[in-house]
Image (cartoon, rainbow, N blue to C red):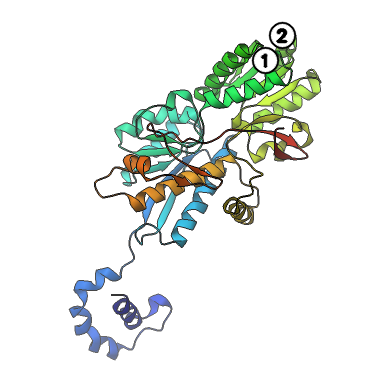
Amino acid sequence: MPNLCRWMKFCLGSKNGLDPAPTRRRVILMPLLLAASVTVSGCQPETPVQLAFLGSLSGKGADLGESGRNGALLAIEDANANGGIAGRDVELLVYDDQQDPNTALRALETIAKQDIKIVIGPMTSSVAEAIYPALQRLELFAISPTVTASALHGQADRFFTIASPTQRNSQVSANKLYQQGARRVAIIYDTSNRAFSQDWADHYRQYFTAAGGKVVALLAYDGSQSGSFGHLIEQAKRAEADSLMLVSGAVDTVRLVQLARKEGDPSWHIVASSWAATEHLIQLGGRSVEGVWMTQFFNREHQAARYRDFSVRYQQRFRQDPGFASVTAYDATQAIIQALRQKSPQQTLDHALLHTGPYTGLQAEWTFDRHGDANRPTFLTIVKNGRFELFP
């Protein structure tokens, strides 16, 4: 068949940049072409396997969405360079949910109409919570690189997660804050991503209190609305906090840190949630975010050849370092491709994902538990000399 395909392409001419064959030759060959018409369809390229990416690519949350999209793209390029799936290329269709549930729901409807069955995303817990019923109704499978809300973990469903849950991350952070000498923490959290931020604040209070500390202020604000943060810093001061826990995206975390350095207590410990731990935090914050620490889903200092190669290629392609969303999106996409390559026709994708691992991630092997949640470590990092370093 490959030889026949090449012969026909030569005879038919210009599609590969060749001069069209003379008219006389085309006439003479016509009977042969007709005779071969039964097998011509085998010469057509296979339609690609289409996956959808859903994440915020505009507004304040764009850093998370862009990072996840970029990681997924590299995973697909690597897969296609290694034969795709059963000889078919993999194609990524990208949808911007604008961190808006209604926009995300419309995107899901479009994805379903295009007969795409697999979604990589969404990237925030609030969007995931909003679209969860629609995923079931439309019979779509989703795997999120970054969603950590407790309510979306521990369920046997068609929604899988890659990042460790909020409960685990907040416990690691709260215990470390207490060990650093903090005893009175004010928690400032963004309700525009309430499914994550409220969950984080509740668990943080639970673990910090259990360690012996006290949450002296729970301060909520709506990050989807413009406004000053001055009143939040003032309330933290009045509550006599000795530390701040910021549960917000990178952009708002930078603004809050800068205001806290200027108008707050200079002795405050300032801690952020994993939501803020993107490259934009350092790019936008500069020296003002030095000393801020937070949980992460990967180790930027990891020396495994697979991760170092990915990091170099990512920098060359996107002109920035990969962040946690890049790494988790790459691993999520690779897991999907591995499962699609190995699953039997009778298997559903969720069943295949549960039984195909362990998966070779960029930094280590990992697996899904019986609920479709990945078993991966949590790291503590601090901003030091303009980069994220492992917290000592």
Quick check: can you spot residue 224?
Answer: no
Horizontal and vertical percent position of residue 254:
70, 30
Q: In the displayed structure, would residue 309 be above or below residue 183? A: below
**Amino acid of disc 2:** Ala
Q: Nearer the viewer, residue 113 or 260?
A: 260
Q: In the displayed structure, would residue 20 be above or below residue 149? A: below
Total of numbered circles in the picture? 2
Q: Are marks 1 and 2 in contact (CB under 8 Å)?
A: yes
Q: Which residue is mark 1?
A: 186
Q: Nearer the viewer, residue 24 or 232?
A: 232
Q: Is residue 176 left or right of residue 202?
A: right
Q: Which dot marks residue 164? A: none
Quick one: quadrant of the C terminus? top right
Residue at figure coordinates x 33%, y 38% from the top left: 140
Q: Earlier in the sequence, mark 1 or mark 2?
A: 1
Q: CA distance from mark 1 to mark 2?
A: 8 Å
Residue at figure coordinates x 78%, y 39% from the top left: 385
Q: Is residue 283 left or right of residue 193?
A: right
Q: Which residue is mark 2?
A: 239
Horizontal and vertical percent position of residue 162:
48, 37
Label 1: how many residues lie within 10 Å, few (<14), some (14-19) or many (20+)?
A: many
Q: Is residue 135 left or right of residue 268?
A: left
**Amino acid of disc 1:** Ala
Quadrant hosting residue 232: top right
Q: Secondary structure at mark 1?
A: strand
